[in-house]
Amino acid sequence: MSAPVDRAYRDLSPLDVRIQTHRRYSEFDHDVEADVLAAAAVTAADRLLDVGPGTGTFLARLSAAGHAAPLTGLDFSAQSAATCGRIPGVSGVRGDAQHLPFTDAAFDVVTARHMLYHLDDPALAVAEARRVLREGGRFAAVVNRESPYPHLMALLREVLAAHGITPPAPPDERVHGGNLPGLVAEGFDAATVTVLHRDNALLFPGPEPVVAYLASTLTLQGVPEDAGLRRSVVAGLETAARARFRTRPGGIWREPKGYTVVTATACRTSAPC
């Protein structure tokens, strides 16, 4: 895992900014958590491991719904693991998705939501998910569409370049909606793989949420932890965003986005799953 990614998730507040942006400004009311639950056919009796739980909202949702079986959240972020551990009925574990600290066949469901693209070896993480699933257990992974947020990223690259900063390659170039099905098929029986695509967009009514969203990604973009430099970058984002809005028809910024949910079943015998 890269150093910028490691630093970016020590504090979960920037992640929460991005989550709230999607909840508030999405064009369509898609519910990715509900899509994952439905695709993986999760029941209250399933022992579920959520790999990369972030702020823990997915596990909190299950807990609030009265999930009866044990729930586990594993994240390399100490803050994420601690946050999950405070949710009733949830065990928060700090660990590596590529080397899961669990025995074989320990879970009925494993979910990996918007995290595989942050890993050095996502195929190994998929293989580890399969290892800890029981026979007939279900795996569900979610990633962004290929090349999401093209206008946002263009503005961000422009401002970073003006400050002499070259961001790392976007994580979506590694794992995205186009190649995730093949990645999962390599770790599971390809005949069990299912794919759900959701296309959507962010509709921004003004520059403020654009700037807030992009500012929340600065650590991921490799921007040094220098307060003066960050203030300058944010000011540049504000100037560039206001200029963009002056050319937007109707004053609305429409930013294409989307996600893909891929599920598979763990089959270890020749019998049908």
Image: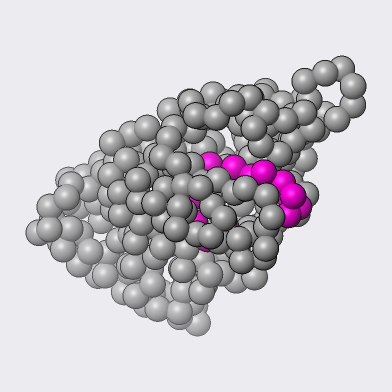
Residue 56 placement (x, y as % from top left)? 49, 56
Residue 139 placement (x, y as % from top left)? 68, 38
Numbered range of the magenta stretch? 42-58
User: Which residue is rendered at x = 87% and y = 17% of the image?
Assistant: 270
Question: For residue 43: magenta?
Answer: yes
Left or right relative to 163: residue 20: right
Q: Residue 141's image quarter?
A: top right
Residue 103 placement (x, y as % from top left)? 59, 26
Front-lying residue, 209 or 192: 192
User: Which residue is rendered at x = 60% and y = 61% of the image?
Assistant: 63
Check the image and report above or below for 115 versus 132: below
User: Which residue is rendered at x = 49% and y = 33% of the image?
Assistant: 97
The residue at the far bottom in this view is 250
Residue 171 visible in the shown view? no
Residue 207 placement (x, y as % from top left)? 36, 74
User: Which residue is rendered at x = 51% and y = 66% of the image?
Assistant: 22
